[in-house]
Amino acid sequence: MEYVETLRAAFRETRQRHPFAIDAVVVLPDHLHAVWTLPDGDRDFSTRWRLIKSTFSRRIAPDEAVSASRAAKGKRGIWQRRYWEHTIRDEDDLVRHIDYIHINPVKHGFVTRVRDWPHSSFHRMVRLGIYPEDWALTLRPGNSANGLDEAT
């Protein structure tokens, strides 16, 4: 997780040019999840992701493994080509997605307690009183916290 600060800087820089609120986020060794709120009338997730990815990529050494097809196109191997976008339908949907984000390090076996994963908005939400520090303490890796499937 040596590049977390670089990723944070890419998010900050992008947010300065194209504002959005980060409602929840978790950064894992091989992927990340986030829930954002964009300004009213703005639905341009793609520009923001493109800027985050390109800003981050420019700041790290180009030594990651790259497939032959990506190399032929001059593309890097650190990001998947697409992202999954979902418009939150209601408060319950929002809660389910934020819970999913925060349980992800446990689900993937990186930690046994949500509070033990440092790269998560969970800690901010504990400070704000939204979650108790021992939230999901009884969940085990592989269990679903909220019924969302793997595609989320």
Image (cartoon, rainbow, N blue to C red):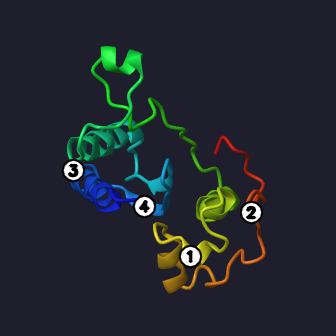
Residue type, mark 4 in image? Ile
Left or right: residue 100 compared with residue 120: right
Q: Residues within 10 Å of mark 1 (few under 14, many from 20)?
A: some
Image quadrant assignment for residue 68: top left
Residue located beneath label 3 in the image? 17
Marks 4/1: CA distance? 21 Å
Residue type, mark 2 in image? Ala
Q: Secondary structure at mark 4?
A: strand
Residue located beneath label 2 in the image? 145
Indicate the position of residue 70 as horizontal and vertical percent values. 37, 20
Indicate which label's residue lies in the foreground, 2 or 3: 2
Residue at the (59%, 59%) spot, across then down: 101
Indicate which label's residue lies in the foreground, 2 or 1: 1
- Residue 22 is labelled as 4
Indicate the position of residue 124 as horizontal and vertical percent values. 47, 77
- Going from N to C along the chain, the mark reached first, 1 or 3, is 3
Q: Secondary structure at mark 2?
A: loop
Assess whether mark 2 and mark 4 are in contact (beta carbons under 8 angstroms): no
- Going from N to C along the chain, the mark reached first, 4 or 1, is 4
- Going from N to C along the chain, the mark reached first, 4 or 3, is 3
Q: Residues within 10 Å of mark 3 (few under 14, many from 20)?
A: few
Residue type, mark 3 in image? Arg
Marks 4/3: CA distance? 15 Å
- Going from N to C along the chain, the mark reached first, 2 or 1, is 1
Work out whether 63 lies above or below 122.
Answer: above
Residue located beneath label 1 in the image? 116
Residue at the (70%, 61%) spot, across then down: 92
Marks 1/3: CA distance? 33 Å
In the image, 84 versus 17, the foreground residue is 84
Marks 2/3: CA distance? 35 Å
Indicate which label's residue lies in the foreground, 1 or 3: 1
